Amino acid sequence: MSIMNNLINGTNFDHKSLNALQKVTLRAVVMSFLFFGLVAIEGMIMRLVQAHAPIPHMFYHPEHYFSIMTVHPIVGIFGSTYQLVFAAFMFLVPFLTKKPLYSIKLANAVWLLITIGTALAWLSAFFTGYAPLYTLYWPLPADTTQFSVFGGIVFIVGVALIMVGTLGFIYNIYATIFQRVGVHKDKTTKELLISGFGIDGMLNLWNKLRGKQPYTKEPALALPVVAIFRGTVDTFLDAIVILSAGILVLVYLLFDASGHPLNVGAIDALLYKNYFWWGLDLVADGLVLIYVAGSWYLLATLITGQKLFMENVARAALMLELLVSWMVWSHHLLADQGQPEMMKLISGEMVTAFELLTQGLALFITLVTLWKARPLKITPELAYLLGGLVGFGLAVPAAIIQADMGMNRILHNTQWIIFAHVHIALIVGLYMTLYSAVYVLWPIVTNNTRMFSKKLTWTHFWLYLIGGVGMGAFAGMAGLDGMLRRHLYVNGEFNTLMILAAICGTMVLVAWFLFLFNIVMSVGIKGLIGIFLPAEDKTASYGIEPETVAENHKV
Amino acid sequence: MTFSSSLELLAFHNVAYTIYAFMIISIIAWFGYNLTRKEKAPSKVRIPFYTYIGFLVVMGVGHHIFTYNTIPWVSQDIKRHEIKPDASYKFEVGKHKWINMPKHVTVQCGQTIEFDVQSRDLVYGFGLFRQDGTLAMQMQVNPGTDVNGILDSNDILWTFNHNGLFDVVSTEYSGPDEYDRETGEDLMKVKKWLTVVGCKEDGGKK
């Protein structure tokens, strides 16, 4: 088959054979990877500026540079990551519970709202230079002496649309879980709630300690669904906080536009920081860690075809993570001298340290599950899963190190935080886990479409892994040398490390291009367009047995 | 063991984390390789589950106990309102300019200095950087007033044990107006603002 034929028709992809659930999943996946490309290009522009590369001078202008820095996490976290995670979960929950998705229409609205919202935020920064950064530290987002009121309003409306889309996802997930059809026909809401929060696992452990029969031998919900259930609680709280902060900014901007500006001093900056970080941290330390733990458990069981090791402990740990994720936000405020010392000590240091325990536990359970099933063939999905474990194995201890009153004094707001911790966690830890999920779900969601090239898959893997770890390491080292994360350097101050980081960043960008090329060559342009056409088969569920996936990994 | 300056701590941290990073990458790579082998890899070390959990708890909590006992500015920061500084410098920041800031400060070796910075409008940062660009210390500078309209304090105590020249940089982003719109130069950076004198070459009082 010629390259051109592949480009147009793909391998054996037939979009007409896809049902409504498969199509809505793929739509969000396509948008997610397009946004990933945008975020990688944005990241590279910033890397090139910091490496003092000979690129057009406009990129060195502070308003341009910081507007890129403002939308970079919006596009990356919401436009790309949220879309991919939401798509995967809106497919997985019906798949694992053997029930239809509550609403395909709502699922379509979710990816559309997030896509439009992300695009609006991006356009606002691009055309008006609105650049308060994702932290939105009060009163910067309402500072109309520096930013355009119109730009601010469009940006906030964009973020609000993303959050409304997020609420739509949450509703769809819970409505699907609580539907009393199929295997859950005879379950009560109480039983589903107990299972969803992981309380049944805790009660099983408690009964075992007391020598009694387990509370339940067959939990109402599968473990990955429990992780999705639990993580979605944090997704909800986070959406409410960001939405309410957005409304606050919007009110100030609208009053400013009407010629009657409000007093920004009426809002306490430190209190606002606490509120905003409590919500924002639920993304990083709540839903990401919980969703990732759940994804590891699912991938390990699908790849090995075996039961998860220590399943009750895993269920209980998800409950523990609930408490931990709500009480750790103060580690973002260790450099704020007005923050009460006890909050720094308890929330910022001690409770945060428990993330080492919860994530270490997830790592342990996943590794042992894989180990017990050996020998296994190293397939792309297994390799990406191991890459994801490496990512969090590096990023979580980096977080614990900086969430310390001594270390934070010299690491706060440096490149160490954003690269050695955040970028390694997201690019390597989270995305490699998601790539693993993409490769596991690919045959299911696309009706066994052949991947165009295995060589491209493996080239993507190695370029992405080395590039991701390398960029995090070199830029993180610059942080140890004093380089700030939200600062513009125009004199090549950290040139050597920034050039090395830019080289590694280029590897990530090239890896993304190869991945996209491989996908496009597999589904073809016709197939790609077909994904966005209405599905002839309106089925909102998918019933392939998970065991069939494991067959592909047996040596 | 005590770290007398942030440079020593950063060097220690760099070495410790690099060793850890290579270790965790090697373990997962070794693990991946052994997953594929038909013959069972001999158990080199058997780590019981509860020992592993205990290790994680000890590492998480022990790390803070270690830093509390080896990094002098931690306890000093917690008890700073009970400590009388050798000198205090109080100034403000507003519209991306330092206001009433001394032109230059000279500190004798071993002196504990209080910096109290108040913001009139936005969130800024206050950081001291060595001439090689490394960060000596920093804090966030939040705006706000009390009920009487007096600006909120953002205060920090710092003891200087090594000679050196330090620049002041705002360590928090406060909008593009912090920079020259054309050249991108940081307009809030104050070069060679603080000098520490009277220390031995390897630190500490003469």
Image (tube, rainbow, N blue to C red):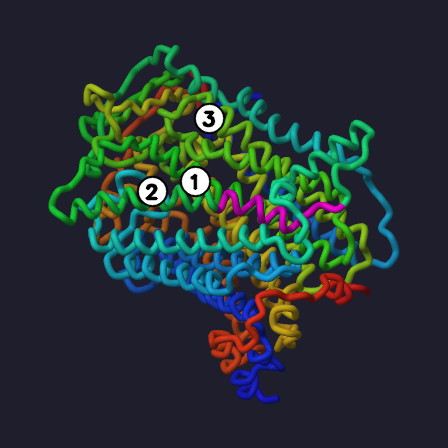
Q: Is residue B92 left or right of residue A290?
A: left
Q: Which residue is mark 2?
A: A245
Classify mark 1: residues with Cα within 10 Å, few (<14), some (14-19) or many (20+): many
Image coordinates of residue B111 in percent, x first then y, are: 37, 16
- Which residue type carries mark 2? Ala
Residue range highlighted in magenta: A218-235
Image coordinates of residue A335 in percent, x first then y, are: 40, 30
Nearer mark to the viewer, of 3 and 1: 1
The residue under the point 73% across, 48% down is A367
Q: Nearer the viewer, residue B67 or A324?
A: A324
Kindly identify which chain the residue marked by label 2 belongs to: A
- On screen, A10 above or below B93? below
Give the dominant element type of the magenta stretch: helix, strand or loop: helix
Q: Quadrant of the N terminus of chain A?
A: bottom right
Q: Earlier in the sequence, mark 3 or mark 1?
A: 1
- On screen, B5 above or below B37? above
Q: Nearer the viewer, residue A10 or A2?
A: A10
The residue under the point 29% across, 50% down is A131
Inter-mark Cα distance, 3 to 1? 17 Å
